[in-house]
Amino acid sequence: MIAVKSIANNINIQTCSSTFLAIQLSAKWLTVVVFLLLLAIVIVSLLWYRREQELLHNLTDIITAPSEELEDAGISGNKSQEPKDTREAFISLIQQRRQEMDRLNKLENYRRDYIGNVAHELKTPIFAIQGYIDAVLDDPEIDRETLQTFLSKASKNSARLAQIVSDLDTITKYESGFLTLNMDEFDLLNLCHEIAESMELQAKEKNISVQVIAAMGEGYVVMADRPRIAQVLTNLVYNSIRYGKQDGNTRIRLSSTLEKVIIEVADNGIGIPSEHQGRIFERFYRVDKHRNRATGGSGLGLSICKHIVEAHNETIGLISTEGAGSSFSFSLKLAPKEE
Ligand code: ADP
């Protein structure tokens, strides 16, 4: 009986120890599995963190980089490029927004500049007119001669005001691309003579001679928009007188090549310093801002000339030496010769 009991006890002990072993083994496996799981979670988290950091880095680069750099790097918010995944789509969206913001900022600066310049231009004649009117009103015993002088000065300034407004209207149309040309055949030599004659009065005030020079026998029939070319010539000749010296001269010279006519308006006036020459065709740009505003003009004349010449697919250029004179030249296409 005792022997049977001890056998039974033995079996029990063995069963217990094998259960214990099994539990021990399971615990070990469990630890390994948990460890592996934790490792996997850490690795995935690290990878995810790196990806997020990279994304953040890219976004920061895009947000802080100037648009030109983005374009140079071949990154553009072009909608036609299909984004590969959500991340790229997001970056592309940010790029588009960024470019839009740049464009709006540029427009805002342009608008601010434009309004500032316009206000500045209008101020001079308006204040002058106001000044002459006040002077007349303040002096009830003003003599007839002074009254005449003040009124004529007020009238000159109001004409200048009208000129500025008209130039502003013209430049706005040109800059917004509403310039349509009425191309026609006409003799440029005739037009040059017409312009020279129309400037006689202004030229006389400074005793400046205005001459038209063209080789005999050559044809100068061009294909262009006559009224607009007349405007270019008027602006250039008028400038040559305004910035010309007393007793000076203006030459309107024509020369032709196989396909084109080169028109040059040259003077021996004050000239344009080299540091200003690159910007002289910009609207409102002036060499001597105060003096030029006082001598009249809107600061838009050369800018209008450039728009008109470029609308003809031609170019306008300048050669000038300070103190010696300036020469503006542009080209026009000759009209096709009749067979
Ligand atoms: P503005 O109404 O001031 O004359 P423009 O656009 O016609 O405006 O000319 C711009 C500037 O270019 C002038 O203010 C002047 O400083 C300079 N300029 C233009 N033409 C001449 C010239 N023939 N000689 C010297 N300076 C000139």
Image (cartoon, grey):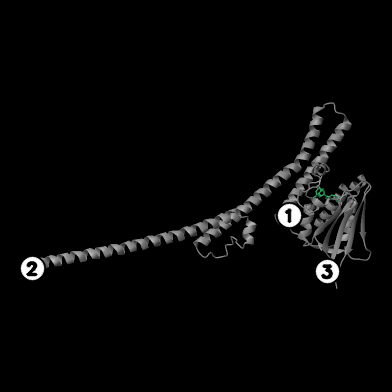
Q: Which mark is residue 174?
A: 1
Q: Are marks 3 and 1 in contact (CB under 8 Å)?
A: no
The answer to whether the beta carbon of the residue marked 1 is less than 8 Å from any atom of ligand 1 is no
Q: Is residue 205 left or right of residue 69?
A: right
Q: Earlier in the sequence, mark 3 or mark 1?
A: 1
The residue at which mark 2 appears reads as: 3
The residue drawn where x is 85% and y is 37% is 152
Find the distance from the CA under tag 3 to the CA under tag 1: 27 Å
**In what element is the residue under mark 1?**
helix
Reply above or below: 36 against 147. below
Which class describes the residues within 10 Å of circle 1: few (<14), some (14-19), or many (20+)?
some
Amino acid found under the numbered disc labelled 1: Tyr
Query: Type of residue at label 3?
Result: Pro
Ranked by sequence position, the earlier of labels 2 and 3 is: 2
Tag 3 residue: 336
* Distance Cα–Cα, label 1 vs label 2: 120 Å
Question: Which residue is at a point 80% across and 43% down the rendered structure image?
Answer: 293
Image-quadrant location for residue 5? bottom left
> How many C-alpha atoms fall within 10 Å of the one at disc 2: few (<14), some, or many (≥20)?
few
List x then y, in percent, for residue 58. 55, 58
